[in-house]
Amino acid sequence: MSDEILMTESVQVIHSDETGTSDYMINLTLNYYQEEGQWVGFCEELGTSAFASELEQTQAELREAVELQLNGVEGITDVRDYLADNQVVIQPVKPSRQAGFATV
């Protein structure tokens, strides 16, 4: 990528099972840069991307896109295999109440 990364953030994403119990967490790296007057964000590990005119909007849209991607993958295949294929480390967590994935 020829565009200079202007900001990087690490986000924790919590997975909960169908009962709403949190069972594991993953850490993802989100990078942001500007291209032709737009902010572009992308997740290093998953290849997910989003863009908007404001950085804050790009951050929100990228986090939502990551959640949608992970929930979609979980609906069609073993998400743990998908994460392993993308070199994402799964870490156990304490129980929560919400089903699916959520950024922290």
Image (cartoon, rainbow, N blue to C red):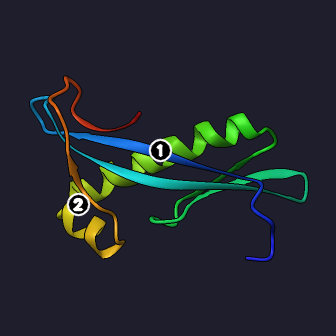
Report the amino acid beneath label 2. Answer: Val
- Label 2 crowd (10 A; few <14 / some 14-19 / many >=20): some
Question: Seen in the image, is 79 located left or right of residue 72?
Answer: left
- Label 1 crowd (10 A; few <14 / some 14-19 / many >=20): some
Q: Which residue is mark 1?
A: 11
- The residue under the point 51% across, 66% down is 47
Placement of the C terminus among the 4 image quadrants: top left
Residue 75 or 6: which is nearer the viewer?
Answer: 6
Q: CA distance from mark 2 to mark 1?
A: 18 Å
- The residue under the point 21% across, 69% down is 81
Name the N-terminal-most of marks 2 and 1. 1
Count numbered badges in the picture. Answer: 2
Q: Single out the mark in the foreground, 2 or 1.
A: 1
- The residue under the point 45% across, 64% down is 46
Q: Against 39, is 56 above or below?
A: above
Which of the numbered marks, if any, corresponds to residue 76? none
Question: Seen in the image, is 20 located left or right of residue 58?
Answer: left
Residue 67: x %, y % from top left: 40, 45
Residue 30: x %, y % from top left: 57, 53
Which of the numbered marks, if any, corresponds to residue 79? 2
